[in-house]
Image (cartoon, coloured by chain):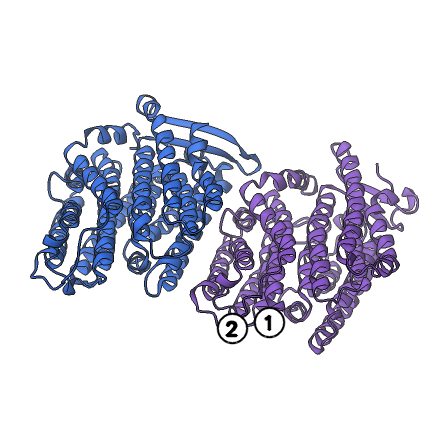
């Protein structure tokens, strides 16, 4: 019952949103934030069971005729991702209560946020492909309208691009789901995994490709990344934080859970499975390089951060390609969590800078450090974490992945090459992170007036900064939680 | 066992009360203020009686469905069944009756409300709608090819009059086009039927089926099949016979288009499915799936490509209807239990979605908005209507949790299951194309500035939105909890095994 409630709770906030005063600016944010906090508490309530039993599963009547009961499921990986998702949603909602104050029809914005929460959390806490797909696609509609209605410049164009690209990917996923149902008669990923063993090998390869292709679009792996820079740059800052922090990571999670976790182990031909992993690894390296080098060349503050997301999804994909190495997978999942916190924070910072100064070209900024010390502090934390500086979040996960890479490389020297390339890519990450800080905060001042944001906007920034630092110095429990899932 | 007249009660009620509608409405017309409400009351009364009659059939059928899954009722005695007009009650026809009643009630109510607003509500129009509904329900329950043909043609003639009701040049032209097409189609059908009668000595579904099983030489059957299929293809508007549909649906008033797309269109798919799967069961009797698959691919692709090119929104929705026919045919070609389920689900959901789209577009048309350009920026001025149009768009595009998703999922999975993976891929690509142009409509509604200036006083018609939202809510509920419909169609999927050897 707890998980079902956690799944549907955000919906309950919508009637409240309709009832309150339509003109009020802060109340709707408070309602959505309170419901998200309740949701978080519900999820944490099942955490002990996950830690001791490894997973927590409940099942309800839904569509037995199509082999789809309403199965909700949490293990270490889903729990950690769902928790970081909710933390990020709470931060974004609190942040937007002041950030969005100039926009109209805010209660609609928050209602869409609540709908988005259902989809986002649902993707992580189900073991049924049909519910997974429901939630996967359910994210699209609120995201489209949030980007379009409250974004910058040609926002609806960016939203259109986002919608069409991700829907096209989702359709490939749908074909994969249909094929699994046809072969096994069930949509539960664990049952399907057992039943698929007798399926024709050739078919499995195509199912894997369909799934991975669809998920890679959402993950924005080069060359399927075209939607990301526009969508992330034109969305309002809280939405960018969620897009970059959670939505694209849902793609990585899905590759891990469905492509690699369900279909891949049954591909018995070693050469085919090696080729697949090689391809994932190479795509990861390409994305990492492409993203970080483009970020180095961009001048728009949000586009820099957006391209950095492409680069970091490359890291995650590289980590996943080390399957079934424990270090690689745990590192990849940990990287998703760390990246969510760091990139969410960085987007909130970028939004703050844009709101306080009114410009988004970093060449026109400079010297903001003395005027906006708090923003400077949290931006530095976030971008250093993104760059992989030790003692901040992303360092640990990157380190784990590289360790895994070298371990796997012991058996297959191909991975020495990709791991080495990944390590070189981190240099570029550091370069764009330093460039960002230097251009925005340190260079000689070009802006007359600027000041730190209001208290309400500062709270989520400080909160996320603390999380990034905490994850960097004390990630033991999280690693323990993730490895308890035992996906390999 | 149900008798002939028991099974015909829903239709008989509809026919009788359709005839009574004209004098009754004449009388209540004198109460000018109460006219609209009394009309609605009248419609609700009729539908209540029909619902009771259908429920009776439903209960009686399911009481003995185990031992008698395909229950027949004859006009003459059973011994001469090859001559007798007969009715067939099975899980499919009872389900279809429920579908027609649900969607029919909503679209008739919409028609009453819309025409009352325009002061054009005539007794004749309402009576015709009820007549068409009655003959469609009778056609659904019919158990031989001739009864089916007669009731089917009756409904087609009624549809003609519904289309022409607007009485402007476009609707007259569209009606003429439709009339020519259906007359040609009925010629084809009758010719094909005469050959089938010659081959088998009967027109009863089961007798024909059994006779065809024994048939050594199938060449003549192929010709007969080609004629019948061609005839029904014209009435279903399968490409290349689709030209009349966009014209007719664009020219007719919104309530007519909604009614026709939700009832008559779905009924024509039903007829197609009944004949192809239940009589000409492949591969025992005739191996038609590949031929139909090609037409299916053609229909979706052409429908979507033409829809992409339209600037008139109502015409665009009409072409979406054509594309929907293609998706339906995919499910028919698979001939699997899942395909049958997908098909029956599509009859309901596809009908509701097109009806919803036509109703919402009709509200906007009444305000003078017709072209895609006119729709610029209406999202803020007419929020409720735009929201209902978004529900339709999402359901068409197959985005969960709207019901259109489940139907598309079942249809595509059935195609893969039936060994037509390529057709599923074409269908999926088409679905993407569809999402693209429908999203363009949303883009116009929300992203662009208003082009037309409206007075503050111009508001959405609240009462008209009630039937629209009834459909919208149904679509969402069925989308979230499809078991409501799935449990009704599951028996049909299981009974398919009785037909396949």
Where residue A466 sits, quadrant-wise, is top left
Q: Is residue B413 visible?
A: yes
Where residue A122 sits, quadrant-wise, is top left
Which badge, 1 or 2, comes first in the chain's sequence? 1
Q: Is residue B68 left or right of residue B422?
A: right
Chain of the residue where label 2 is placed in the rendered structure: B
Chain B's colour is: purple
Q: Which chain is blue?
A: A
Chain of the residue where label 1 is placed in the rendered structure: B
Name the quadrant of the N terminus of chain B: top right
Respond whether the residues carrying marks 1 and 2 are from the same subunit. Answer: yes
Nearest the eye: B369 or B148: B369
Does residue B425 sit above or below A57 in this rendering?
Answer: below
Toward the top, the furthest residue is A52
Mark 2: few, some, or many residues within 10 Å (few <14, many ≥20)?
some
Residue A165 drawn at (x, y percent): 38, 57
Mark 1: few, some, or many residues within 10 Å (few <14, many ≥20)?
few
Q: Which residue is mark 2?
A: B452
Circle 1: element type: loop
Q: Which residue is mark 1?
A: B368
Check if mark 1's residue and mark 2's residue have beta carbons within 8 Å.
yes
Residue B181 drawn at (x, y percent): 73, 70
Toward the bottom, the furthest residue is B169
Residue placed at 76% from the left, 51% from the top? B140
Does residue B46 sit above or below B366 in this rendering?
Answer: above
């Amino acid at each position: 019952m707890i998980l079902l409630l956690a799944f549907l709770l955000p919906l309950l906030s919508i009637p409240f949103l309709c009832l309150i005063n339509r003109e009020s600016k802060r109340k709707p944010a408070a309602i959505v934030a309170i419901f998200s906090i309740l949701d978080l508490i519900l999820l944490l309530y099942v955490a002990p069971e996950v830690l001791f039993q490894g997973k927590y599963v409940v099942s309800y009547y839904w569509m037995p005729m199509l082999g789809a009961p309403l199965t909700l499921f949490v293990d270490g990986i889903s729990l950690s991702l769902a928790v970081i998702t909710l933390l990020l949603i709470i931060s974004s909602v609190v942040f937007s209560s002041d950030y969005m104050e100039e926009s109209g029809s805010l209660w609609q914005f928050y209602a869409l946020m609540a709908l988005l929460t259902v989809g986002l959390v649902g993707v992580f806490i189900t073991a049924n492909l049909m519910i997974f797909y429901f939630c996967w696609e359910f994210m699209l509609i609120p995201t489209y309208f949030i980007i379009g209605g409250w974004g910058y410049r040609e926002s609806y164009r960016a939203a259109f691009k986002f919608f069409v690209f991700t829907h096209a990917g989702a359709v490939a996923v749908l074909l994969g789901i249909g094929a699994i149902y046809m072969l096994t008669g069930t949509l539960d990923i664990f049952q399907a995994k057992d039943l698929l063993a007798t399926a024709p090998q050739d078919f499995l390869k195509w199912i894997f490709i369909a799934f991975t292709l669809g998920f890679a679009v959402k993950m924005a792996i080069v060359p399927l990344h075209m939607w990301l820079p526009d969508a992330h740059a034109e969305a309002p800052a809280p939405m960018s934080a969620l897009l970059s922090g959670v939505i694209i990571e849902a793609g990585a999670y899905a590759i891990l859970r469905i492509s690699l976790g369900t279909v891949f182990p049954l591909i018995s031909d070693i050469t085919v499975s090696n080729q697949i992993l090689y391809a994932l690894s190479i795509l990861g390296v390409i994305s990492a390089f492409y993203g970080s080098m483009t970020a180095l060349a961009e001048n728009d503050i949000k586009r820099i951060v957006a391209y950095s997301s492409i680069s970091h999804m490359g890291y995650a994909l590289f980590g996943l390609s080390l399957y079934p190495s424990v270090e690689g997978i745990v590192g990849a999942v940990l990287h998703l969590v760390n990246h969510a916190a760091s990139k969410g924070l960085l987007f909130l910072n970028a939004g703050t800078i844009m709101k306080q100064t009114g410009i988004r070209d970093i060449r026109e900024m400079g010297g903001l450090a003395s005027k906006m010390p708090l923003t400077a502090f949290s931006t530095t934390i976030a971008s250093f974490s993104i760059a992989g500086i030790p003692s901040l979040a992303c360092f640990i996960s990157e380190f784990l992945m590289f360790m895994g890479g070298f371990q796997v490389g012991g058996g297959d020297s191909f991975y020495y090459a990709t791991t080495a390339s990944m390590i070189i890519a981190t240099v570029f990450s550091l370069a764009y992170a330093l460039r960002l800080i230097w251009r925005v905060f340190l260079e000689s001042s070009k802006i007359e007036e600027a000041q730190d944001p209001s208290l309400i906007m500062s709270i989520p920034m400080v909160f996320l900064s603390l999380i990034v630092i905490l994850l960097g110095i004390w990630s033991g429990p999280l690693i323990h939680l993730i490895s308890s899932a035992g996906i390999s | 066992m149900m008798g002939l007249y028991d099974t015909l009660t829903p239709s008989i009620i509809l026919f009788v009360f359709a005839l009574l509608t004209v004098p009754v409405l004449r009388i209540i017309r004198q109460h000018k203020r109460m006219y609209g409400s009394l009309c609605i009351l009248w419609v609700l009364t009729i539908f209540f009686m029909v619902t009771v009659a259908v429920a009776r059939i439903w209960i009686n059928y399911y009481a003995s469905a185990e031992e008698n899954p395909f229950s027949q009722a004859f006009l003459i005695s059973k011994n001469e069944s090859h001559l007798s007009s007969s009715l067939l009650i099975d899980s499919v026809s009872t389900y279809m009756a429920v579908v027609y009643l649900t969607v029919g009630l909503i679209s008739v109510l919409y028609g009453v409300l819309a025409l009352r607003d325009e002061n054009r509500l005539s007794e004749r129009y309402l009576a015709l709608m009820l007549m068409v509904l009655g003959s469609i329900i009778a056609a659904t329950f019919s158990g031989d090819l001739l009864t089916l043909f007669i009731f089917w043609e009756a409904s087609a003639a009624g549809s003609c009059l519904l289309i022409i009701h607007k009485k402007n040049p476009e609707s007259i032209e569209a009606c003429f086009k439709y009339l020519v097409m259906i007359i040609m189609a009925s010629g084809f059908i009758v010719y094909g039927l005469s050959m089938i009668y010659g081959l088998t000595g009967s027109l009863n579904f089961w007798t024909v089926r059994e006779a065809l099983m024994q048939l050594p030489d199938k060449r003549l059957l192929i010709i007969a099949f080609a004629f019948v299929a061609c005839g029904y293809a014209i009435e279903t508007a399968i490409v290349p016979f689709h030209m009349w549909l966009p014209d007719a649906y664009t020219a007719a008033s919104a309530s007519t288009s909604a009614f026709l797309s939700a009832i008559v269109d779905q009924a024509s798919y039903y007829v197609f499915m009944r004949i192809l799967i239940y009589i000409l069961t492949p591969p025992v009797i005739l191996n038609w799936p590949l031929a139909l698959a090609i037409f299916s691919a053609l229909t979706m692709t052409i429908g979507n490509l033409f829809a992409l090119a339209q600037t008139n929104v109502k015409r665009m929705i009409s072409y979406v209807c054509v594309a929907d026919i293609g998706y339906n045919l995919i499910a028919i070609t698979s001939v699997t239990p899942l395909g049958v389920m997908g098909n029956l689900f599509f009859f309901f959901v596809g009908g509701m979605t097109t009806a919803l789209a036509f109703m919402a577009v009709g509200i906007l048309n009444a305000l003078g908005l017709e072209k895609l350009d006119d729709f610029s920026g209406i999202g803020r001025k007419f929020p409720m209507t735009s929201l209902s149009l978004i529900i339709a768009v999402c359901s068409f595009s197959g985005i969960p949790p709207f019901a259109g998703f489940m139907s598309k999922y079942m249809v595509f999975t059935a195609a893969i299951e039936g060994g037509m993976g390529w057709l599923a891929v074409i269908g999926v690509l088409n679905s993407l194309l569809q999402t693209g142009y429908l999203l363009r409509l949303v883009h116009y509604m929300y992203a662009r500035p208003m082009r037309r200036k409206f007075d503050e006083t111009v508001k959405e018609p609240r009462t008209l939105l009630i039937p629209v939202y009834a459909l919208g809510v149904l679509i969402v509920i069925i989308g979230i909890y499809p078991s409501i419909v799935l449990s009704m169609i599951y028996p049909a999927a299981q009974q398919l095994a009785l037909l396949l050897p």
